[in-house]
Amino acid sequence: MEELVYVSPDELHSLIQNKLQSAGLKTDHAEEVAKHLVYADAHGIHSHGAVRVDYYAERIAKGGLNLSPHFHFEKTGPSTGIYHGENGSGHVAALEALKCGIELAEETGVGIVGVSRIGHSGMLSYFADYAAQRDLICLTVCQSDPMAVPFGGTEPFFGTNPIAFSAPTANDRPIIFDMATTVQAWGKILDARSKNKDIPEGWAVNSQGETTTNPHEVQGLLPIAGPKGYGLMMMVDILSGSLLGLPFGKHVSSMYADLSSGRNLGHLHILINPSYFTELSSFKNNLSRMIEDIHANPPATGFDRVLYPGELAEVTFAKYQETGIPVAKDIHEYLISDVIHHNSYDHGSAFAEKNEEGEE
């Protein structure tokens, strides 16, 4: 049975921020990254929460993240622009780019902003939620390093290349849909590794291209719904990579190849202002009615009720406000320790693991 430590959101934020600052990230950037990671853990998406801190701290400490980037927005049209991240924190750059896109959407009805040359930008629903809270529809996508076997292929080519969508409702919480284009995100495999738990059949393959349930054997992830997921991950790669003149597919930098170099990743936000298409309150009321109708749908055997996309994360969030956020004991011990990082990730392969001494 996995040992867990329950901590308050504020305590977890403080621990993460302190660790990232100790690694060298400046205070305001460390604060935003910590906010992002706590958001993930607080919504039950532990694959994008505190489990990532050790990796981020190692990359920061080894110089693979620009600690003083000159972030700047280049407007390229009435509703478009490119936010230059200069290989700074992807979490911070993507949020600042989103703010630029929000301004464009409020002014013109649509805002499309590419985020060029950044580090890992984390959980996409964080950005989708931010936009929906400001009464905008959001579609946000980003590329990642090659980890997924293409449909009919044997070697990884595209990344998990996630997609998130959000829309505001008349209620407190928006509709948010966030998914990897693989059956599961790589972070879910990392989470299973950290907890020494098996993964379900059909998530990933081993070095022989055979499906495996052992997270330590994973050498490739599978696209969701076969050729459909394969097509989606190509679409995301084009929108967030090639569209910005950045590396594509198998040429995207590995998360673990060289932690002393920048990642040069791409991200794209598409924002739509509903008030330019219909009456805003009517739009939001219709989506709230949609949720009510979904809840009224008779549940199948084994289900209590039908949930709308993102609702389970909101249920989890409410629960964790009372119980505290569960964190694996070894991760918590790392966060409260004086160790900056464990030198565990700088090994080239996205799927490799190292022992406690940092050797493969």
Image (cartoon, rainbow, N blue to C red):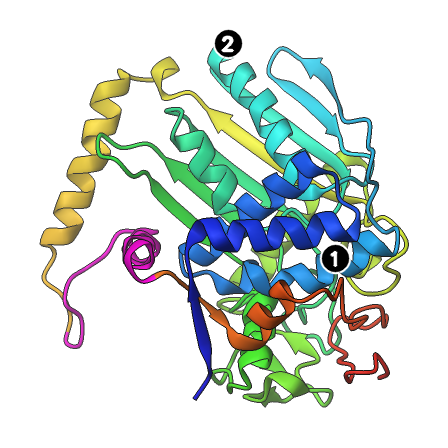
- Residue type, mark 1 in image: Ala
Across and down, in percent, residue 44 comes to 41, 61
* Residue 185 higher or lower than 92, as above or below: below
Judging by the rendered image, the residue that carries numbered circle 2 is: 107
Q: CA distance from mark 2 to mark 1?
A: 39 Å
At 66% from the left edge and 43% from the top edge, which residue is drawn?
30
In which quadrant of the rendered view does residue 300 lie? bottom left
At 61% from the left edge and 55% from the top edge, which residue is drawn?
233
In which quadrant of the rendered view does residue 285 lie? top left
| Element marked by disc 1 | helix
- Residue type, mark 2 in image: Glu
* Residue 167 higher or lower than 315, as above or below: above
Q: Which residues are magenta?
A: 301-323
- The disc placed on residue 57 is 1
Of the pair 343 and 151, the residue shown nearer to us: 343
At 58% from the left edge and 89% from the top edge, which residue is drawn?
214
Across and down, in percent, residue 147 comes to 70, 68
- Taking the image as shown, residue 12 lies to the left or right of residue 136, namely right
Across and down, in percent, residue 225 comes to 48, 68
